[in-house]
Amino acid sequence: MTTEENRTRSPLARRDLLRAGGAVAGVAGLQLLAPVAFAGAAGAKSPDAPRAPETRTVTGTFPPGVDDFWYLPVDVPRGVRQIDVSYTYDKPTVPAGVRGNACDLGVFGPGSLAAGNEKAFRGWSGGFRTSFSINATEATPGYLAGPVTAGRWHVVLGPYTVAPQGMHWSVTITLTYGADGPAFRPDPAPTHAPAKERGTAWYRGDCHLHTVHSDGRRTPDQLVADARAAGLDFITSTEHNTPSAQLVWGGYATDDLLILNGEEVTTRSGHWPAIGLPAGTWVDWRYRSSEPAAFRRFVDEVHAKGGLVTAAHPFAACFGCAFEYDYEPVDLVEVWNGPWDAGDDATVLAWHSMLRTGTRIPAIGDSDAHNPDQVVGLPQTVVLASALERGALLRGLAAGRSWLAESSAVDLTLTASTLGRSVTMGGTLKPGAGADVVVELAVSGVPGTTTTIIDQTGPVASGAVDSSGRGTLTWTTRSRYSTFVRAEVRRAPTVGAAGAMVAMTNPIYVEVAGS
């Protein structure tokens, strides 16, 4: 393939992709484009002579129906100090209802491209950036700093959607030669936030957040400031498909906010945040729901590292965002994502149906905040944990010892009691079939709302909360009638829609003794 080569842009059969993009047959299921070579040391007069930067530009065309990921091999010679990559693609006008062009960008360093090869991964920015740089000292957010080692690198192009006219793309790679600068030093977040530690208590957190390390527009320090202002005790950093932020949080941490590590694993069949990971953990995302073994493999890897898996915004309207995988290995369902909308209502209904059939997956609520105009902690998950510490918080979340709120101004308790024993969310009561179970919901900070107690049959009791914002609702059942109870607090319904959620709980389970 020649530099700055102009390509014809018709017709768009697969053979034209192979010719225009210089593609070769896939190797072990990978779609590879023709390699890009540089003169490197061969172009220098002597080993110590300065070498000017070298640039190569390649072009190609993706037709509709193209594979998800294409790899552009780049043969990097010795002595390279920095690699810079930029790309462009056309965005032709398409009719209403037809998807236009969108293409993701990332890179792997030397090594196998096989699924899960964490050592080769060097960064991802999706469609958020048009360029990136990597050297030993620093890298563009979303990418991993480190030496630009000699060998075959691979620029990843991910045609997310392709217009009927096809996608005409261009990639430019520049290699800069010279000695490496100081080595990058990872600075992960501390494992404790002593100013907020309260022993066994209810801790407020937001476990789905983004910064400039993926497609967010907050810097890490801005996210920390907004989380503290929202009254949160902990957050989880979940950048799309990259661990780069996990390696820098120590420079922004405070003693009153615990920062956990995560990744929003962003596949073409839905998103699943992996939360509570060891710093520097990368989880692969190059598969679809049609490959359940791949999904299960990486879920198992997250669990092996002590993390939890969340099914994110299962009914999100954006392309590729709705969760299409099996829920069986999932730890949490994100039933509330950002300001309440119809997708959240659909998720709560689906989650309630799971509960009715005996599937006990706890709910979680997260802001998924990307930009400064999106409120961190709307919603937030309030979890009962023995300490403000990763393991304790994850155990509380996995057990469903939690409830969701629109802000830190909202407070709530839900208990179920029988025969002198009382439990809260995530707990199980096992009375005899004839014993009464008294359910009590108490709320504050929710003026003008309606409280509702719900069991597997649907709403069973409700009450109005006056302008004081405080209210108590009590209802009695028996284990022969109710298999679980949960609660919701909502505002008044609007035309054609249920009222917006203000708070909701995970279930308390009720079983017949001896069953």
Image (tube, rainbow, N blue to C red):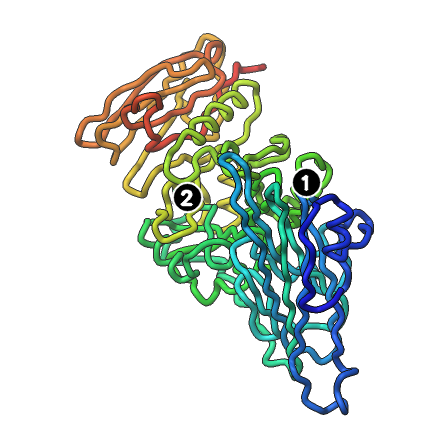
Percent position (x, y) of residue 197? 40, 53
Tell whether 319 sits left or right of 385. right
- Give the quadrant of residue 311: top right
* Quarter of the N terminus within the rendering: bottom right
Tell whether 246 sits left or right of 341. right
Instruction: Kindly identify the residue that appears in the image at 56 percent across and 18 percent down.
Output: 357
Type of amino acid at the residue the image marks with label 2:
Ser
Q: Earlier in the sequence, mark 2 or mark 1?
A: 1
Whole-number angstrom distance, CA of label 2 to CA of label 1: 33 Å
Residue 424 can be seen in this image: no
Q: Nearer the viewer, mark 2 or mark 1?
A: 1
Q: Residues within 10 Å of mark 2 (few under 14, many from 20)?
A: many
Reading the image, the residue beneath label 1 is 65
Instruction: Kindly identify the residue that appears in the image at 57 percent across and 24 percent down.
Output: 359
Type of amino acid at the residue the image marks with label 1:
Gly
Label number found at residue 46: none
Say if 438 sits above or below 412 in the image: above
* Quarter of the C terminus within the rendering: top right
Instruction: Kindly identify the residue that appears in the image at 72 percent across and 59 percent down.
Output: 72
**Residue 308 versus residue 417: which sits nearer the camera?**
308
Which element is circle 1 on?
A: loop
Which element is circle 2 on?
A: loop
Reading the image, the residue beneath label 2 is 367
**Residue 256 versus residue 88: which sits nearer the camera?**
88
